[in-house]
Image (cartoon, helix red, strand yellow):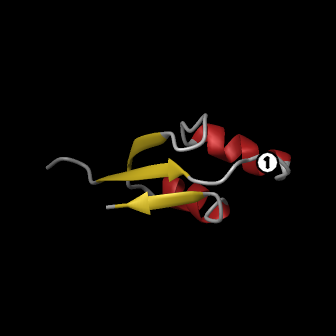
Amino acid sequence: MAAKKIKVTLVKSVIGTKQDHRATVRGLGLRKLNSSAELVDTPEVRGMIQKVAYLVKVEG
């Protein structure tokens, strides 16, 4: 059975945010504004998304 995927999109700029939040966004594979990444839905990825929830949009 294939692992469930979620799509994460950076919708707010990381300028002015904490350094560890910027690192988390990079760890999710997001670079520029409106860039997206397809990630496997794991507890680790969910925790990263929760940390920077005010910067990203999650689908599916």
Quadrant placement of the C terminus: bottom left
- Graded by Cα atoms within 10 Å as few (under 14), some (14 to 19) or many (20 or more), the crowding at tag 1 reads few
Percent x, y of residue 22: 74, 44
Percent x, y of residue 40: 37, 48
Left or right: 38 in relation to 52: left
| Residue beneath the point at 44% across and 41% down | 37
Which residue is identified by label 1?
20
Percent x, y of residue 21: 74, 51
Q: Nearer the viewer, residue 37 or 41?
A: 37
| Residue beneath the point at 46% across and 51% down | 8
| Residue beneath the point at 74% across and 47% down | 14
Q: Amino acid at mark 1?
A: Asp
Q: Quadrant of residue 27?
A: top right
Q: Quadrant of residue 25?
A: top right
Q: Nearer the viewer, residue 40 or 14?
A: 14
Tell me if I can see residue 43 in this picture: no
